[in-house]
Amino acid sequence: MGSNHTLRTNSIKSTTNQIFLWVDYMPLKGPEMDIVALKGMLDDYARHFNSGNIEEWLSLWNRNGVHMMHSVPAIVGIDEIRIEMEPIFRNYTVELTINEILDVIVDHDIGLTRCNYTLKMKNSKGKRVPGIPDGKTLTIYERQPDGSWEITYDCSNSNSRRISFPSK
């Protein structure tokens, strides 16, 4: 079954000490489905970031989203996020890997993910440049009227004491 189902196992013990086991798939619903959706948002975030297509990546964001990165002021609104991030998408090849999802929390129409990641980067000449070898991020999502989720806040930085991120 797809990722929208969960495996449920059941067993009974008969009077003859035989064990019967059956398996069925139950559709996910409610909070379980929301958790799957938010984990999918993390996958999409990395996939779109790695694709180099800023518009695909920005499609995950709320138009009033706030992007908070290491050593720069908060970037507010999709247009400002585009302006700030476009040089990264244009000048670098990136490899963003979500290493570990630490938390996925849903409370009604607000969701939160916390994870660790690695960001490797190469400039336009193919030379490796410093990225973020040991990063962490906290992302807050808002459910939209159609049931989809959008990023409203994304705060990421490094677990390392010093980080070197290429300038625009």
Image (cartoon, rainbow, N blue to C red):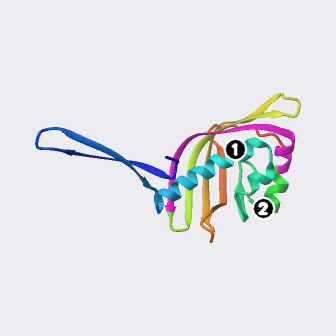
Q: Is residue 38 left or right of residue 73?
A: left
Q: Amino acid at mark 1?
A: Arg
**Which of the 4 quarters of the picture holds residue 14?**
top left
In the rendered image, which residue does mark 2 sit on? 78
In the rendered image, which residue does mark 1 sit on? 47
Judge whether residue 140 can be spotted in this image. yes
Q: Callout 1: few (<14), some (14-19), or many (20+) C-alpha neighbours within 10 Å? A: some
Q: Nearer the viewer, residue 112 or 30?
A: 30
- The range drawn in magenta is 86-106
Location of residue 28 in the rendering, given as x and y in whole percent from the top left corner: 46, 56
Q: Callout 2: few (<14), some (14-19), or many (20+) C-alpha neighbours within 10 Å? A: some
* Mark 2 or mark 1, whichever is nearer to me: 1
| Residues marked 2 and 1 touching at CB (< 8 Å) | no
Q: Is residue 137 left or right of residue 88?
A: left
Identify the main secondary structure in magenta.
Answer: strand
Q: Is residue 82 left or right of residue 145?
A: right
